[in-house]
Image (cartoon, grey):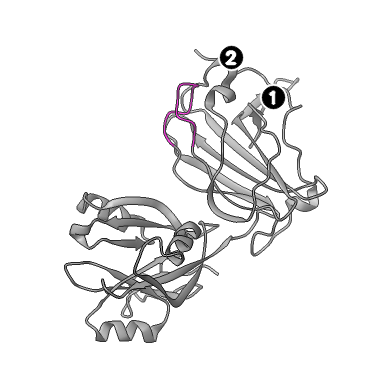
Amino acid sequence: MYTIPILTLRNCLPLLGLALLGSVASAATAPYIQLAPAPIQPGSCSSAGATPEIAANVDLGAAGTYRYSPGYVVPYFFDDEGEFNIVWNQDATLYVAPYAHVEGRLLRWRMPIAPLSTWFGVFGRVPEHTELALRVAAYDASGSAVATSRMTWDCTSGAILRIEHRGNAVGAVPARLVEFYHALLDHYFVTADAPEIAALDAGTFTGWQRTEQAIDVAATPYEDEGAVCRFYLPPAFGDSHFYSASAQECADVRERFPAFVFESASVFAALLPDPATGTCARGLRVYRLWNARADSNHRYTADAAVKAAMIARGYVAEGYGPDGVAFCTTP
């Protein structure tokens, strides 16, 4: 049986003020760091496991800093009177990283994380299925904590159990789907990934040009949004990419088309429309149009006129309701 050492609170990240805990914002405001929900590798219960890969949306401004701290959740305790008390979100700190700064506004930035051997130290491991936590905090130029984000997961399975944001990290982080066109291939491609956009603009992948079409989305799921998955179709299937906001469709594609490369479970966030009517509870309707050719390719647009023009060219609308709405943006 493994026992977990009792750790002091002296290394804990400072708490935000009460006024900050109650703040609500429509969009995250710099300086912030916001953990992005993404699968955690199984087996992080011991020093021998794989160090979790943690992604975050971050904008620290010119002078902001951040630091992170892993811990494990203590779900209950007995007080001096012997009474049983449930205490949520009580984390025993394992390690506190030094302050750091990163430049620019980064989406799904892979945080540099200390190895599990640093987390667990001399005792080596925690019991299977322990709820581990990673907390991050952003600080303004004066050193005041202005944003925190916390994610917990099952150390055995890697399943994410909860994620929460406070202060400046509250709210969706905006992103933009930028569309490109390859005239020789007659293919379209959209991406919200900044490095991909920069590489395409720089001509790293020859033949691609911006169409001047773009769709504003949320970078990662927040509140009721869902994640949009992405597949790469190898040259034999079109040398193209496919997006879906339906978790079921993502799973079906993985099962039915094992040759497709599953690139990510979450490349941006979206809502599903009403399956019968295609109506969006909020945001813009986005259409997915398939070229119905052997070199399979899809075009994604929020412009009804563009949709009509593509259908006139022989494209097939794929989506929900009579208008074929694939997903809804999350402003």
Left or right: residue 104 versus residue 42 is right
Which of the 4 image quarters holds residue 253? bottom left
- From this viewpoint, which residue is outermost toward the right? 142
Which of the 4 image quarters holds residue 123? top right
Q: Quick check: is 51 in the magenta stretch?
A: yes
Q: CA distance from mark 2 to mark 1?
A: 32 Å
Q: Residue at x 58, y 14 (%)?
A: 122
For label 1, the SS is loop
Q: Residue at x 20, y 73 (%)?
A: 292
Residue 148 image position (x, y, % from top left): 68, 46
Q: Nearer the viewer, residue 137 or 107?
A: 107
Does the magenta stretch mainly form a helix, a strand or a loop? loop
Is 331 above or below relative to 87?
Answer: below
Residue 326 image position (x, y, % from top left): 36, 70
Is 63 above or below relative to 111?
Answer: below
Q: Residue at x 36, y 60 (%)?
A: 246
Q: Which residue is mark 2?
A: 122
Residue 172 image position (x, y, % from top left): 59, 60
Given the image, on which type of amino acid does mark 2 rest?
Val
Q: Nearer the viewer, residue 75 or 142?
A: 142
Given the image, on which type of amino acid does mark 1 rest?
Glu
Left or right: residue 99 versus residue 224 is right
Residue 83's tag is 1
Image: magenta residue range:
41-52
Is 330 above or below relative to 213?
Answer: above
For the residue carrying disc 2, how many other residues have a C-alpha within 10 Å: few (<14), some (14-19), or many (20+)? few
